[in-house]
Amino acid sequence: MTQSDEKAAGDRAIPVVVIGASAGGLVPLERFFAHAPDAAGWCFIVIQHLSPDHRPMTDEWLARKTRLAIRHIEDGAEIAPDTIFLNRPDTRAGLQGNVFRTAMYGPEDPVPHMPIDTMISSLAPRASGKTAAVILSGAGSDGAQGAQVFHAAGGVLVVQDPAEADFPSMPQAILTLGIHDRVAGAAEIPQAIHEILGSGLKSAPEARPVTEDIFLAIFRLLERQHHLDSSAYKETNVQRRIIRRQHLRGIEDPAEYLALLQSSPEAVNELYHDLLIGVTEFYRDPDAIARLRETALARFAADRSTEAPVRVWVAGCASGEEAYTIAIELAEALRATGNTRGFRIIATDVHQQSIERASTGTYPATAVRKIPKPLRERYFDRRGEDYTISAPLRQRMIFSVHDTLTDPPFLDLDLVSCRSFLIYLRAKAQARVISMFLFGLRKHGVLLLGPSETLGHFADDFETLDGRWRLFRKTSGPRVFDREVLPRRLTPRATRDEAPGVPWGQALTLSRRASAGLGDYAEHRGREALLRAYDQLLRTYAPSSIIVSSDGEVLAWFGAASALVDTHNNLTEWSVEHILHRDLHVVINGALEKLRGGAMDPFSRRATVDLNSGRYQGVTLHFEPLDRHHKPLLLLIRVRLEAGGEEAHAVDEERVTVSAEHEQKIAELSILNTETESLLTILDIGLLVVDSRLNIRRFSNHVARWFLLEKHDVGRSLSVVGPRLSFADLPAEVTRAIEDGAVFAGQGITGAGPLSLEIHPIADQRHGGRPGGAFVIFRRPTR
């Protein structure tokens, strides 16, 4: 299909407007449809919170207000122009292409149900077309999660003005996220949608235009400071994030925002984080996870012809929920068959803070509500209101900062999962990523993409396992790596940050297997440089050392360290898990995570190695990074032979005792934290704690609910993500409290209703009692 054909098809597509409404929603629905066009060819989908115990009257109510046809959503029905579709009670509904898909809620589904989230999320594949989402009056935050997915895909989002909503929580939840395109009264929203869909204008007409040269200048800043290849991303998505961050800074003139970025690396860092924060959740699209287990994970678990662990790469893992979901399902599949075959999941993302959060494996109770209770009990440890991934499952995960667009792929993979990332990329960048996945997968390996993503011209290399959920199996054999798909960071043109004279081939550290696959790429100067490095290492560190790459591959070992290496049973898979002694895995993998995190200093750790027959040997491992500038990085492990059995056991016993004391202290602190949170809840108080630099240190559940703060907001600046109050400049007042010791008190109306505010400085006893931060206290005013 030519571009003109695609444009013509897009022009003929039926415009879709989804409207989410909850408590107090009938009046704004009446105002909306009193001004909505009844012959423009639009399809309206209204999703409400409906009680299964009462017959909904929305159809009869609206029939008196509009000439549009009114129908209820049925599974398999197609959208239609000049029609209002209404959801049914106790039923979730989504749109697949132009067809509705529905399912009844069951007892296993988490409550409260989020039907607006479900429908708006399903719009993401058509977000770049003539599609809009509207959020009207309602209690709670249903719609906010789906709106993030829809917004990230480039969708139009219009919100009712909270000032006219009887229940402003749902509109306010969107406004707090800063992902809306317009705010308007219910009667004005149809005209706003008409302007946007008709002209493509997403900002208000009176907003100052953003010129192409300003966007290009911002792109160059992102590329220079964070190596972000902005040319790989769809321009519309990047521009929307830039405009969002500009507005959050309270800046109307794009040129003024550019000037800020040019003078403030921190402002560039904020924008970079906004561009990269992904949206994920446990058991997102449960039907897709079920099909993955049926078609792939169950097959891996049933395969008893090999003891090699299953290797999985979750690319663009964000905060880790999807990676842990696959780990749970794979563990369950192996458990069901009784297969002792292990597995390793490599979860990567370019966003450092997301990887750090994912590595902790700790999530609030609201995040795990979709996980069936038996699985929660089996794979999580509950501490207060948080759930933490159990240690046996966490030990099978490796979280690493990795750029799927520019870094080399992982190899010998049985499964690659990359959902809802390709939709952000241009066609050439999509092809680059698929090529990387194809190169890393074993033959018959499985690829899982997002519901709106395709293989492009690599379709002939795969067979389709499930077309709806984009499950594919690789059918082609080994491929010679195509250098044409390499991005600029991996081509012979050195970046401006590389030291002069460094061969371009050293940007990739190649193992024996990778070298064979990459062919002539490795035969350039990179091979010679690697050999020279080996020679130097042998002279300097022999005879007792191990060299490991940041992706866990054992590249070489010298001297007495060979006693800890066994390649007899595995001639091809030279990873830490396969050929190094099992008692070293945990400590080495911990060092590799530090290495991938980018801030590793040399350090030492002690381990005890089981030599069988009741004999133990203590060893000290000294870890030192060899290369801080290129990826994958190299880790040098120097090994020393120490005192034997009895001394090793004595040290271990002391270490276990200290560890137990630490765990007891942690448990006591957890109990104290839970008791403090319970007390704040009983007193109906919201508490926000900031440090001397106005970074958020912690916040209570009330503050999280009232102002829609999330776990990853800890550590971020109050001026960036903190509450916006009409009656007080919160950052300014907190600064005054810290600097002058002044106490502030005030009250006014917020998105959570009327609240009083107090700000008290915190005395830092470590620095003579000077203020080291502030308590920000919110209360509901007494009547």
Image (cartoon, rainbow, N blue to C red):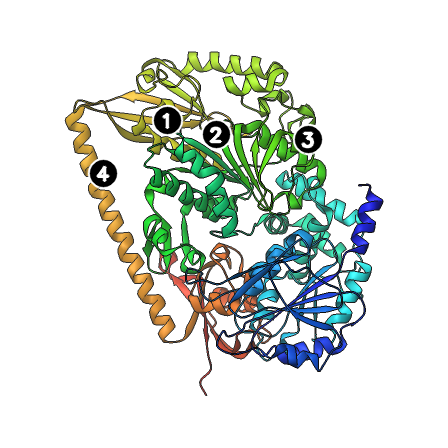
Mark toward the viewer: 4 or 1: 1
- Rendered image quadrant of residue 44: bottom right
Sequence-wise, which precedes: disc 4 or disc 2?
A: 2
Q: CA distance from mark 4 to mark 2?
A: 29 Å
Sequence-wise, which precedes: disc 4 or disc 3?
A: 3
Indicate the secondary structure of the residue bearing disc 3.
Answer: helix
**Residue 566: x percent and y percent?**
34, 18
Which amino acid does the dot numbered 4 rest on? Arg
Residue indicated by mark 2? 551
Quadrant location, the N terminus: top right
Q: Do labels 1 and 3 touch, CB within 8 Å? A: no
Sequence-wise, which precedes: disc 1 or disc 3?
A: 1
**273 above or below 480?**
below
Q: Do labels 4 and 2 touch, CB within 8 Å? A: no
Residue indicated by mark 1? 307
Q: Do labels 2 and 1 touch, CB within 8 Å? A: no
State left or right for residue 215 relative to residue 133. Answer: right
Residue indicated by mark 3? 488
Residue at the image point whose x is 47% and y is 47% from the top: 290
Q: Closest to the observer: 478 or 631?
A: 478
Q: CA distance from mark 4 to mark 3?
A: 49 Å
Mark toward the viewer: 1 or 3: 1
Which amino acid does the dot numbered 1 rest on? Glu
Q: Closest to the observer: 31 or 491?
A: 31
Which amino acid does the dot numbered 2 rest on? Asp
Q: Which disc number belongs to residue 655?
A: 4
Name the outermost residue toward the left.
646
Q: Do labels 3 and 2 touch, CB within 8 Å? A: no
Mark toward the viewer: 4 or 3: 3
Indicate the secondary structure of the residue bearing disc 2.
Answer: loop
Q: CA distance from mark 2 to mark 1?
A: 21 Å
